[in-house]
Image (tube, coloured by chain):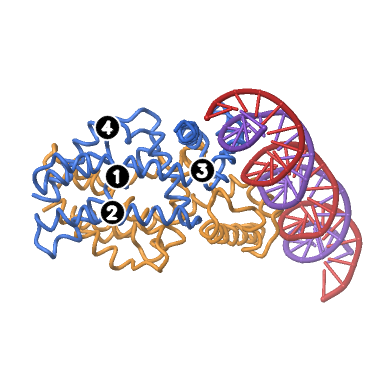
Chain colours: A blue, B orange, C red, D purple
Amino acid sequence: MSRKRIRDIRNEELIEATIVAVHKRGYGVVTMAEIAREAGASAASINYYFGSKEGLMEATMLHLLGKLRQAMSAGYATAGSPRERLYAVMDANFADDLYTVPQCSIWMQFWANAPYSPRLSRLHRINRARVRSHFLAELKALLPPQRIETARQALQCYMDGVWLQAAQSEEPLDPEAARAAAHRVVDLVIP
Amino acid sequence: MSRKRIRDIRNEELIEATIVAVHKRGYGVVTMAEIAREAGASAASINYYFGSKEGLMEATMLHLLGKLRQAMSAGYATAGSPRERLYAVMDANFADDLYTVPQCSIWMQFWANAPYSPRLSRLHRINRARVRSHFLAELKALLPPQRIETARQALQCYMDGVWLQAAQSEEPLDPEAARAAAHRVVDLVIP
DNA sequence: AACGATTTTTTAAACAGCCATTCAAGTTTT
DNA sequence: AAAACTTGAATGGCTGTTTAAAAAATCGTT
């Protein structure tokens, strides 16, 4: 039992440290030593747990993807209509514990590096397809078929674009305002 | 005269090589030697012309930003109404000679690295502010004040989001289709 | 047109530094 | 005692930049 526990604790600590360190220095530039220092551990122990730097990055993204998926599922449970479920998708993306500068920063680094790492690009494809199918399912109930694809593109690209901008921000973000803005965009696209 | 010429030729060659090499390998990973090989030159000559790797990157982005600004100006000249000028902004972003995988790829790398380089983040701020003011100027003529900001965000984030997606593409892009889709999004936002 | 002098361009080699990963030798936990 | 965990130090390799010297281009003068 605690054999599992200690490993899980270290994993989480190291992943949190990775998020902070990558945010501070950038994915391509950050070193194992910096991440280790951030976690109060040694570079060697990271390899002990994750095998390599790439393994650590994959685990970190897996962690964030999990959080996002979970937030989305939670929102879906309480939404009662297609439009509310669209709101829920947006709310999940701009949830208080996801829409922060360091995390948007990581996402940005993730996007930028996905084309050069099969493991990362696999995660990227899976996540994008999932979000896409969520959008399509709800839009089908709200729009005539010939307008669905344009609306989906507008909404999905909007979400990406907001994160992209957020990653550049030098001040803390305002998740509540982001959710309100996202709702207005949904209303703009689905009158 | 030809004293200037040779320098300009090398500059352009090296910048083109940078675009290709960064697209192939990623900003943070690409080496001076790889860029040099792509250009058929030596790493030392890059430093001779650009002073450093960061100087080369800045020059490369300056080059792309110039192309974008030029495309936008050209479109503005022939547009006769606010809506057509909005189309023109979109058309510039998805112009045949800008909306290609390698260039979207570079833009992605640019975005990801801007927060860590004062020189790059300066360029980023300038470009974003310029696009923003173009949008605002046209939207002012088309929408009541309280709806302008939401529409601007929707359009600007859409543009960023499409490029972000394009950078992940493994096939050549279809600029004409992208322009048509962008026009539909404009029509969606400005009925 | 020719030619030596001067400036500009090119690069091979040297330099100095940094990095991810491994490993052996410890420490802690079970 | 055995297994799990931790790390300092060593390894091997790669990087951007500088330097010095050669090659090419340009220029002033005849």
Q: Quick one: B131 or A56, which is closer to the camera?
A: A56
**Marks 4 and 1 belong to one chain:** yes
> Which comes before the other along the chain, label 2 or label 4?
2
- Name the residue tied to disc 4: A175
> Which comes before the other along the chain, label 3 or label 1?
3
Residue A130 is labelled as 2
> Which comes before the other along the chain, label 4 or label 1?
1
Q: Position of residue B188 (x, y in %)?
A: 15, 54
Mark 4, secondary structure of its residue: helix
**Marks 2 and 1 belong to one chain:** yes
Amino acid type of disc 4? Pro
- Name the residue tied to disc 3: A56
Q: Position of residue B148 (x, y in %)?
A: 17, 41
Q: Quick one: A93 or A158, which is closer to the camera?
A: A93
Residues at marks 2 and 4, CA–CA distance in whole angstroms = 22 Å
Q: Residue at x 14, y 39 (%)?
A: A78
